[in-house]
Image (cartoon, grey):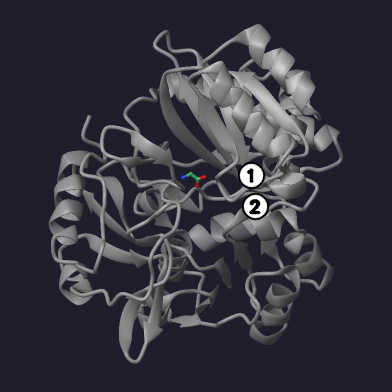
Amino acid sequence: MVVGSGAREHALARALRRSPSVAKVVVTPGNAGTFAEAAPQLAPIERRPLTGGVTVESVVEAARVVAPDLVVIGPEAPLVAGVVDALQKEGFLTFGPTAKAAQLEGSKAFLKELLARENIPTAPFVIVHNFEDACVHIRKRGAPIVVKASGLCAGKGVVVASTEEEAIEAARLMLVDRVFGDAGATVVIEDHISGEEASVLAVCDGERFFVLPPARDHKRVGDFDTGPNTGGMGAFAPSTRLSADLISRVEREIIVPTLRGMKNNGAPFRGVLFAGLMITRDNDVYLLEHNVRFGDPECEAIMELLDGDVAELLASAAMGSIDRRAVRIATDRAALALIVAAQGYPAAPKSGDEIRGLVDAGRLENVAILHAGTAEKNGKVVTNGGRVLAITAHGATLEEARRRAYEAVKLVSFDGMFYRNDIAAS
Ligand code: GLY
């Protein structure tokens, strides 16, 4: 049973149904894509709507009915709210961290303190609880500087400020106006590090881990990295920026000490540890943040590169004894996920528009039209969120994957749709 309604969960459902150990996949609450999936030769995907959204209670209720052998949680909010603890208490094998371990993403202050204790490379920082302290630090360090609400803010709590005034305004909104509620009651202010971003995801069983192909996300809404940050407008894997040597350093300097620190904290980390990295021009690697789940759209590209039994990999990790031979990372192909967004995303996306061309686009070779914000209405598929589709393609080279995804997007249309033209272009 896969929990969530994005393209990430659609990609996970498809990877799980390809797993020889899987007889059936249920996605809850899913979207119009998970509803429409059909491929008679593979395990079926069923969809189970959730009443009242994805809450700990609604997910536990769904699991009681579905009785799955394995639950895989997609988004961070239910993880931080303790859905894994609740499911485990009821006896369901669940892939994902407990609420205590999910603090790595749920509290940036918790994360930064762990990084400092374990000597994990990260930007110098302070943790503040009031506006005056924030101003003193911002004036002392100068701009550019990064202001982060400590708690979960649905991807909106990080401001990369290019002036001191901008940083002070961000701190005011978080600490005085409380635009993020309690999530902004504690603020992390850190030095800005420039370089190239990379996402390294590892499936962890508490002590051991399996590193997935490194990915690159494109977070800004517009071409050439312009406009506001989003959840991600496109991703590709493997990222060409990370050599085998750099990946070994990430394992040694970031993943191993994080797992050690969490174990020593009494919260061994089981689930996906998603290291958001900045690689500088001098090849120094810094951890910007840890997420405790698959990245979206990184997951869509990464799943295209895994052969074998993804279900077995996740189930064995959830049991605390990871089977690293369950999957093989393909070396003969690259993959790319291109997000198609609705007008107004990320601030105020428009919904309810009919999406055309899905069937034709999905027929292209090595292309999968993964759904995110979509719904089914009167037999039609309509937009129902900011990120609407993740057009995912693979090919012998990244250029081939890219060409296929951009060919497919031209066949899809809905009122106000847009996408970036430069995913994997540089
Ligand atoms: N694509 C970035 C994230 O999932 O947080």
- Residue 345 percent location from the top left of the image: 39, 54
Residue at 26%, 41% (x, y): give it.
423
Image height of 186 relative to 203, above or below: above
Q: Identify the image quadrant of the N terminus.
A: bottom right
Image height of 276 relative to 242, above or below: below
SS for callout 1: strand
SS for callout 2: helix
Tell me if 254 is positioned left or right of 44 in this view.
right
Question: Label 1 near label 2: C-beta < 8 Å?
Answer: yes
Q: Residue furthest bottom?
A: 378
Disc number placed over residue 318 in the picture, else none: none
Q: CA distance from mark 2 to mark 1?
A: 6 Å
Taking depth in this image into account, of 97 and 183 the one nearest to the observer is 183
Name the residue beneath numbered marker 1: 204
Residue at 39%, 11% (x, y): give it.
281
- Residue 313 percent location from the top left of the image: 55, 55
- Amino acid carrying label 2: it is Ala
- Amino acid carrying label 1: it is Cys
Image height of 88 relative to 272, above or below: below
Is residue 255 at least partly visible in the picture?
A: no
Tell me if 186 is positioned left or right of 232 in this view.
right
- Residue 163 percent location from the top left of the image: 51, 18
Name the residue beneath numbered marker 2: 317
Taking depth in this image into account, of 425 and 133 the one nearest to the observer is 133
